[in-house]
């Protein structure tokens, strides 16, 4: 097999004093922390679409990046070379997982039957490369948003023929994910939303989306696919409003349609900020409702209102994310998938390495900081103390359902104006800084 990144060898852990930009300074895969290795805690995945298919194109101009695995006029040859390059990259970087959309790995042909055949060729090759390298598939997914047939959505398209096409495509994508031993499968509603309500039957579209997901659940059970299903919330882009707006919205939708036990959520940092939340909020909401599944680890730019999908380098975000993840029991089927792209001016293949190394180190530091927070327990104790009133007397009665409006009125009339306590936000913020 050709070597696609000859200028880079296997990335090693060299410790915090290293000044080698092609080494880890914090991520030490085999180091055991709180009973698990860092690799087991962090479950890093590389995404196929940005890292190997993205070439820096944006709405104002085409791609800027030239890759040696792209240079053939034959689409299937490019697909095979790209897959080889990807596995070389995963192995040199030392991640355990990858993620893909069906159409990232194999180009679409003129008919669905022909497209599926192409997919089978690439999947057979991927299966062999997985076996050779020990890489695992974190999740697979369907691209039912790029082709023009999906311009008005897939499961929420006004046309039942397009719904059927999307269902057929998802069926095949679940099959190939199962074939590759995928630990999960993601549903991201690329164009499941609307551009204007004037032409949209919103109620009917939501019913159809639920039908599509129910069919997927039924089929998954039928073929015995054991991977976890995830919904990935995103509030807008490409449509003005996406139905899987945020974690709260997805949770309500899944409950309404009786799907809540079959899905968890895949939280993307940049989608959280697009929804007007922070990453921390979306993760905390999932943890509080037992919906935390997997994470698309990236970052937006607060001054740009779109999905910039930048590599995550913010230590506060990574620390708070790992704090929530650890407190909720850690990642099980899910992982930290770098759904991120290098900037349009970062044109060299080596930039892909710098980007991933930096992000892996960021989350390794986040993990270590979160462990410090948990082990010294000050933050948790302070939060617990704030709610201490609920562990005894009046609070306990309310929580256990032993008091209603009448008892509470009697209590309030007898005890008068409640004592107020400071929320101590600044003190909590100072405490957080001590761990970073
Ligand atoms: C797009 C999404 C997408 C999903 C998978 O904004 O992040 O890449 O993660 O379809
Ligand atoms: Ca994503
Ligand atoms: Ca995104």
Image (tube, helix red, strand yellow):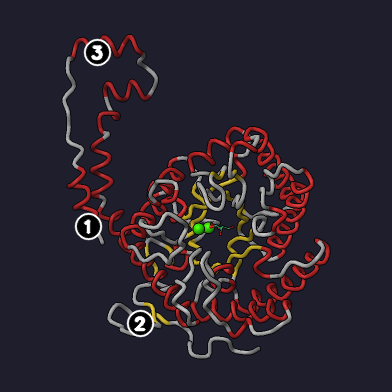
Q: Which residue is mark 3?
A: 411
Q: CA distance from mark 1 to mark 3?
A: 41 Å
Q: The residue tagged with tag 1: helix, strand or loop?
A: helix
> Which sits earlier in the primary sequence, circle 2 or circle 3?
2
Q: Position of residue 210 (x, y in %)?
A: 66, 39
Ligand 3 neighbours mark 1 (CB distance < 8 Å): no
> Which sits earlier in the primary sequence, circle 2 or circle 1?
2
Location of residue 227 by image quarter:
bottom right
Q: Which residue is mark 1?
A: 433
Q: Is residue 403 visible?
A: yes
Q: Position of residue 28 (x, y in %)?
A: 39, 74
Location of residue 209 by image quarter:
top right
Is 144 situated above or below 357? Answer: above
Query: What is the crowding at mark 1: few (fewer than 14 residues within 10 Å), some, or many (at least 20)?
Result: few
Q: Are marks 1 and 3 in contact (CB under 8 Å)?
A: no
Q: Which residue is mark 2?
A: 14
Q: The residue tagged with tag 2: helix, strand or loop?
A: loop
Q: Position of residue 11 (x, y in %)?
A: 45, 82
Q: The residue tagged with tag 3: helix, strand or loop?
A: helix
Instruction: Left or right? Give the position of 37 relative to 3.
Output: left
Location of residue 148 by image quarter:
bottom right
Query: What is the crowding at mark 2: few (fewer than 14 residues within 10 Å), some, or many (at least 20)?
Result: some
Q: CA distance from mark 2 to mark 1?
A: 26 Å
Q: Residue at x 59, y 46 (%)?
A: 263
């Amino acid at each position: 097999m050709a070597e696609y990144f000859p200028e880079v060898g296997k990335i090693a852990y060299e410790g915090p004093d290293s000044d080698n930009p092609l080494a880890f300074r914090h991520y030490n895969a085999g180091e055991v922390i709180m009973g698990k290795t860092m690799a087991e805690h962090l479950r890093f995945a590389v995404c196929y679409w940005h890292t190997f298919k993205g070439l820096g194109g944006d709405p104002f101009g085409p791609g800027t990046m030239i890759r040696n695995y792209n240079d053939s006029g034959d689409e299937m040859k490019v697909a095979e070379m790209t897959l080889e390059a990807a596995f070389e990259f995963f192995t040199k970087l030392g991640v355990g997982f990858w993620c893909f959309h069906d159409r990232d790995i194999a180009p679409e042909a003129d008919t669905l039957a022909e497209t599926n055949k192409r997919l089978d060729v690439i999947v057979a090759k991927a299966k062999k490369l997985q076996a050779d390298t020990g890489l695992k598939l974190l999740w697979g997914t369907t691209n039912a948003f790029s082709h023009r047939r999906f311009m008005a959505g897939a499961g929420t398209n006004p046309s039942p023929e397009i719904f059927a096409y999307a269902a057929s495509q998802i069926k095949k994508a679940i099959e190939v994910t199962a074939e590759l031993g995928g630990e999960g499968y993601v549903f991201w509603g690329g164009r499941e939303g609307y551009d204007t309500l004037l032409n949209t039957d919103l109620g009917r579209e939501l019913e159809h989306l639920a039908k599509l997901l129910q069919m997927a659940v039924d089929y998954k059970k039928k073929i015995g696919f054991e991977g976890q299903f995830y919904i990935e919330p995103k509030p807008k882009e490409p449509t003005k409003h996406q139905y899987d707006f945020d974690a709260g919205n997805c949770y309500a939708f899944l409950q309404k349609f009786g799907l809540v036990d079959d899905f968890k959520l895949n939280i993307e940092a940049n989608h959280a900020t697009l929804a007007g939340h922070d990453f921390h909020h979306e993760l905390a909401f999932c943890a509080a409702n037992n919906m935390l599944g997997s994470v698309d680890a990236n970052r937006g730019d607060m001054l740009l209102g779109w999905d910039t999908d930048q590599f995550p380098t913010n230590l506060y975000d990574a620390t708070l994310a790992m704090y929530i993840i650890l407190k909720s029991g850690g990642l099980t089927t899910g992982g930290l998938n770098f759904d991120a792209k290098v900037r349009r001016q970062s044109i060299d293949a080596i930039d892909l390495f710098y980007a991933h190394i930096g992000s892996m180190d960021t989350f390794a530091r986040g993990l270590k900081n979160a462990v410090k927070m948990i082990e010294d327990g000050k933050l948790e104790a302070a939060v617990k103390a704030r709610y201490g009133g609920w562990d005894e007397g009046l609070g306990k009665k309310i929580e256990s359902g032993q008091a209603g409006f009448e008892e509470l009125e009697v209590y309030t009339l007898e005890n008068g104006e409640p004592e107020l306590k400071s929320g101590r936000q600044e003190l909590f913020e100072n405490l957080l800084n001590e761990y970073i």
